[in-house]
Amino acid sequence: MSDTAPPAVTRYLAASGAGDAAAIADCFTPDGTVLDEGATHRGRAEIRAWREAVARQYTFTSTVTGSEPVDVDHHRVTVRVEGDFPGGVADLTYRFGLRDGLIADLAIVG
């Protein structure tokens, strides 16, 4: 991953790799959002529940394939996900919006 990745993004990716839904949620602002597969999850409790549901539904690994700043408040990470979900492999872009040292919004798009 890029040396320029903001600490909140680095923490999110580490927590995601470890499957730690609570640590993932803690990377977000209290009103943070995640947009994934057309659904928006708002606030830390919903974000934690979203990640727990994903972990129950699928087994997968993620590999960061790129990381770049967009501007001072936005960072983009590309990730290859492989697992037992339909299709088995997906190249995704994680678009992070940052505020006050935390993630304010994350959009995960294919």
Image: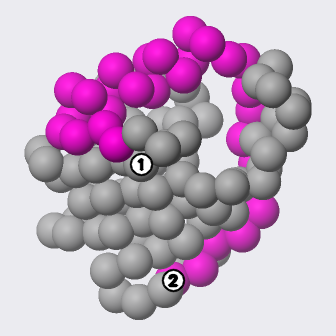
Q: Quadrant of the C terminus?
A: bottom right
How is the rendered protein coloured? one colour
Measured along the vertical axis of the image, is residue 25 above or below residue 74? above
Mark nearer the N terminus (1 vs 2): 1
In this view, the mark in front (1 or 2): 1
Determine if the magenta segment contains residue 60. Answer: yes
Q: Residue at x 33, y 26 (%)?
A: 48
Residue at left offset 40%, top offset 77%: 74
Task: Tell me the kind of residue under disc 1.
Answer: Leu
**Position of residue 94 measured from the top left corner of the image (x, y, whole percent):** 55, 59
Q: Quadrant of the N terminus?
A: bottom right
List x then y, in percent, for residue 28.
26, 48
The residue stretch that appears in magenta: 40-69
Dot 2 corresponds to which residue?
A: 69
Q: CA distance from mark 1 to mark 2?
A: 19 Å
- Local packing at callout 2 (Cα closer than 10 Å; few below 14, some 14-19, many 20+) is some
Q: Which mark is residue 35?
A: 1
